[in-house]
Amino acid sequence: MQHMQRSARTAFLVLLVALLAGCGMARMAYNKGEGLSYFWLDRYVDFTDEQRPWVKAEIDEIFAWHRRTELPGYIELLQKAQQRVHGPVTEAEVKADAATVRKHVLLIIDRSTPGLADIALSMHSEQIAHLEKKFASNNEDYRKDNLRGDIAKRQRDRYKKALKQAEYFFGNFSAAQEQRLRELSDARPLNNELVLRERMRRQQAILVMLRRIQAEKPSREAAIQMVREYVKAATEHFGNADHKAYYQAYEAATIRQVTEIINGTTAEQKAHFTHTLQHWINDFRRLSER
């Protein structure tokens, strides 16, 4: 689901980032999720005094639902990963895990849709303009971070990120392991220009939807349906076959990379992985009991 983490930013992505981004910061973000989510959303929308109380209440309710109903499933998924890492892992198993994560993400999106519709119905033209400027600023940051240099530099930068993520879960890698990870990383499709186009298409679709809602003032039920239609179109890449093919190829190559990394780790690295996931499990258990 990595491409959804780069989609146009709305409330459900705050939850997604907090839960699935990786590293200790994700757990910290989820612990303080309600406040961070509101702060993050406010940077995009610039809420009014009238909007703030009920937006915060919506966010609180979503997090309460998520802790109560979703975290137990995450714990189960992590426990299975702890067990599976000690034996040979197949690409089919990794793909199934990715599908499970996707299912959880879609549940978060669906649960958040009414609240997103409420926000859309309450927004005025100045807030939509503020959101458009924020999108433009983010896109410029993306260009600076991802569109500079030749393909070799971009592959090297991506490999460094992949290595950092792998070391978080497994500990230090040998030179031979690093070399193989570099080969697997470079084998993944790389088209940052396409990613930016996809990102901008999603942003423009959000802006069109918001302006339509502002102009037509639909019922809450109709606005909810409009948000659902946007989500469906975005997850299907707005019918763009080239974009769909790219992300499918990227996902397949990433699954292959993850599978080989796991199968190529030592007993000590597998123990590090199990220990790291246990921290997540312990945190999620505490959070689910709040």
Image (spheres, rainbow, N blue to C red):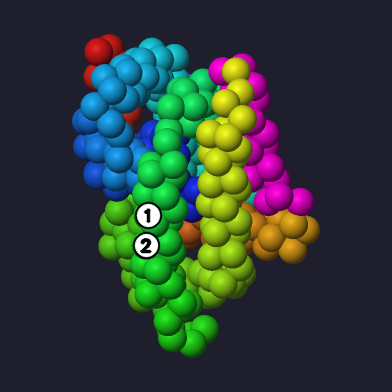
Specify the quadrant of the image occupied by residue 47.
Answer: top left
Q: Is residue 267 visible?
A: no
The amino acid marked with disc number 2 is Ser
Residue 134 is marked as 1
Which residue is depicted at the point 38% across and 44% down?
126
In magenta, the rendered stretch is 220-239
> Residue 19 or 84: which is nearer the viewer?
19
Which residue is depicted at the point 48% across and 31% down?
120
Q: Are marks 1 and 2 in contact (CB under 8 Å)?
A: yes
Task: Please say if 105 is above or below 153.
Answer: above
Q: Is residue 35 visible?
A: yes
The amino acid marked with disc number 1 is Lys
Residue 30, position as x, y percentages in the image? 28, 32
**Quadrant showing the C terminus:** top left
Task: Please say if 187 is above or below 152.
Answer: above
Residue 218, position as x, y percentages in the image? 61, 23
**Does the stretch in magenta take in 234?**
yes
Which residue is depicted at the point 37% across and 19% down?
58
Which residue is depicted at the point 68% across and 51% down?
237
Q: Secondary structure at mark 1?
A: helix
Residue 39, position as x, y percentages in the image? 25, 38
**Does the stretch in magenta take in 5?**
no
Q: Which residue is mark 2?
A: 137
Label 2, residues with CA under 10 Å away: few <14, some 14-19, many ≥20: few
